[in-house]
């Protein structure tokens, strides 16, 4: 999506381009929407950020939708419609106001400048091979004020569309667990809903009249997969999936509110070298950066301390191992981190997979480490064309990594700590674009199958909320790094789960204790530095639902949120321990 250009020459060019698109919809179009002109007087079943139905100005009939784009909101309204897989749809609407956008998530979009009277926008989108629902949206642009929408058309083959079976429930999630039960919650499905059905393979269906249900009679520390579908007199709509694990598991010993940092161990940079013994006790987890492969596709990971010529004051190996022992005696965790910005790790073959398992295991044993942090960046993970189901990936570099991590966690047992530190591009951007299905970058969302396959073994996922472009959140808004808003929206996606682009599949959210978020320790450590007060606002919102700045948590409050990660401990020391001294007491107070 492009930002509007205010230069007259570009607006003129946009007007010329749009003129060819403002054609009337086909005669007697098969509109899937039952209230295209909002004549019911209600915004529902649209979900709007402040939208309302008004009586003027209208394009036809007596009603229209009015939205307002403020300084921090585009006034987005969205609706999920039932569709048929592998089908093409035309989306159109009549709009007026400053910079109005129309589109489908993961599909086409278009926009117009500042029409003083109603003008028609039109675009199209094609559903994926397994896609049964699509989200269409309309919104304004930041700070541009009011806009109006009327006579919306979604033209194409009905897939149990509006006015027939309901749409899919939104954002299914786990709200509570015990050793023998899980409580699920979800957002209301679009259309007429008489009730919901919760299913689990091999078990009786559970009927619910509201947007939640408790499923009992389960085994402790066991993962279950559920689907939730809405129903009415016409039948049952498309199901949404959610994964839940019951309580009663043996933990890996991580601190409840962990302060996690990377320690430059094998290299030096502008922040200088820091001995492990000099890392303050406020840090709960120390990730040793980095283990790297001998070649990108060998799988043979090597780890060594920084050479003395590059890092004056570096420990001997014996001293370093002794320092690890002392940290562990204090209850801290010391992990080997794999990859980093320069560590390209592509497990293209089973031989590379086996070399990875053997070499990483050898390093963990040699240094007596507590586990592994997976920080694969760049081109380590990608999708082959057609790899569209995150639940059943087929690309070797992803399949082999999953297998390798499964082997390591099984070998070392419950005490083994597994963490991951992907960039937003590899996780949250998968909500809009999925590399196995789109013509764009084949790396988008490529961590999703890894996270999903390892969700039982994963102790903490701390996505890097830095070095990122704008990312669309569950509110349909683009969020920019560097403020509380970004951390709230990106972290909420991990808790609530999200639809994966145009695949028709829903990525289930994680448990709150598996989620942290990553920050640069200082302005020199990475793009996206966030002032401490903004970090604390994000933590307040995420853990209690307070101080959210207008954002509504789709995944609910997470008092058990695991904590904060930073790149890096070295940079924090260089800047006088600002990160540690601001955030350690705040985490403790939570």
Image (cartoon, grey):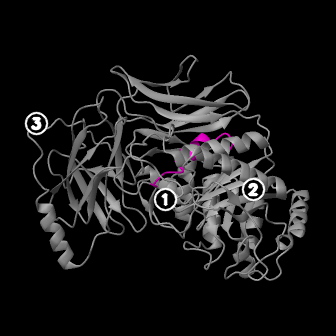
Residues rendered magenta in the picture: 443-457
Say whether disc 2 or disc 3 marks the residue closer to the N-terminus.
3
Residue 28 marker: 3
Instruction: Identify the residue shown where x is 76% and y is 50%.
Output: 361
| Relative to 317, residue 504 above or below | above
Query: What whole-number distance in Å separates the C-alpha atoms at marks 2 and 3?
Result: 59 Å
Q: Report whether 95 appears left or right of 410.
A: left
Pointer 1 with pointer 3, Cβ within 8 A: no
Mark 1 vs mark 2: in front? 1
Q: Nearer the viewer, mark 1 or mark 3?
A: 1
Q: Residue at x 39, y 46 (%)?
A: 385
Q: Which residue is mark 1?
A: 425
Residue tagged 2 = 257
- Of residues 353 and 59, the one nearer the viewer is 353
**Front residue of this view, candidates 545 and 238:** 238
- Indicate whether 457 appears above or below 524: above
Image coords of residue 510 (percent x, y): 61, 44
Query: Looking at the image, is mark 1 or mark 3 earlier in the sequence?
Result: 3
Q: Point out the image quarter for the N terminus.
A: bottom left
SS state under label 3: loop
């Amino acid at each position: 999506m492009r930002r509007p250009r205010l230069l007259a020459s570009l607006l003129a060019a946009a007007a010329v381009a749009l003129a060819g698109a403002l054609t009337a919809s086909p005669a007697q179009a098969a509109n899937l929407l039952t209230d295209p002109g909002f004549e019911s007087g209600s915004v529902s079943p649209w979900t709007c950020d402040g939208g309302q139905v008004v009586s003027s100005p209208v394009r036809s009939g007596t009603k229209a939708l009015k939205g307002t784009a403020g300084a921090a909101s585009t006034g987005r309204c969205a609706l999920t419609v039932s569709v048929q897989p592998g089908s093409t749809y035309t989306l159109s609407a009549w709009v007026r106001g400053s910079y109005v956008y129309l589109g489908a998530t993961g599909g086409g979009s278009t926009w117009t400048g500042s029409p003083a009277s109603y003008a028609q926008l039109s675009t199209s989108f094609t559903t994926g091979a397994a896609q049964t629902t699509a989200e269409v949206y309309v919104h304004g642009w930041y700070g541009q004020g009011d806009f109006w929408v009327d006579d919306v058309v979604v033209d194409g083959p009905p897939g149990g569309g509006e006015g027939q079976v309901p749409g899919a429930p939104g954002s299914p999630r786990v709200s509570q667990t015990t050793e023998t039960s899980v409580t699920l919650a979800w957002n209301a499905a679009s259309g007429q809903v008489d009730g919901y059905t919760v299913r689990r393979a091999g078990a009786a269906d559970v009927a619910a009249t509201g947007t939640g249900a408790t499923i009992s009679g389960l085994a402790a520390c066991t993962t279950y997969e559920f689907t939730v579908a809405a129903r009415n007199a016409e039948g049952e709509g498309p199901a949404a999936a959610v994964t839940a694990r019951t309580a009663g598991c043996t933990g890996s010993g991580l601190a409840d509110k962990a302060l996690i940092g990377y320690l430059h161990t094998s290299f030096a940079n502008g922040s200088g070298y820091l001995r492990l013994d000099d890392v303050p006790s406020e840090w709960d987890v120390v990730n040793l950066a980095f283990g790297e492969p001998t070649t990108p596709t060998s799988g043979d990971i090597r780890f060594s301390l920084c050479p003395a010529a590059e890092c004056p004051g570096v420990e001997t190996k014996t001293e370093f191992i002794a320092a690890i022992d002392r940290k562990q005696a204090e209850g801290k965790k010391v992990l080997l981190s794999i990859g980093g910005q320069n560590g390209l790790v592509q497990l293209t073959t089973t031989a590379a997979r086996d070399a990875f398992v053997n070499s990483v295991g050898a390093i963990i044993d040699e240094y007596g480490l507590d586990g592994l942090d997976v920080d694969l960046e760049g081109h380590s993970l990608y999708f082959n064309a057609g790899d569209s189901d995150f639940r059943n990936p087929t690309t070797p570099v992803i399949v082999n990594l999953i297998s390798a991590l499964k082997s390591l966690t099984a070998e070392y047992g419950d005490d083994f700590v597994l963490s991951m530190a992907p960039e937003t591009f590899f996780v949250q951007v998968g909500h809009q674009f999925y590399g196995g299905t789109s013509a764009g970058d084949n790396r988008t969302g490529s961590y999703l199958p890894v996270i999903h396959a390892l969700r039982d073994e994963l102790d903490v996922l701390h996505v890097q909320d830095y070095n990122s472009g704008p990312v669309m959140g569950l509110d349909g808004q683009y969020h920019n790094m560097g403020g509380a808003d970004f951390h709230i929206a990106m972290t909420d996606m991990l808790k609530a789960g999200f639809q994966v682009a145009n695949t028709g599949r829903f990525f289930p959210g994680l448990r709150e204790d598996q989620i942290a978020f990553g920050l640069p320790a200082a302005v020199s450590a990475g793009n996206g530095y966030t002032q401490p007060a903004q970090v604390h606002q994000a933590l307040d919102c995420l853990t209690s639902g307070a101080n959210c700045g207008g954002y509504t948590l789709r995944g609910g409050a997470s008092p058990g949120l695991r904590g904060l990660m930073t790149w890096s401990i070295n940079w924090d020391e260089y800047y006088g321990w600002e990160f540690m001294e601001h955030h350690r007491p705040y985490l403790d107070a939570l």
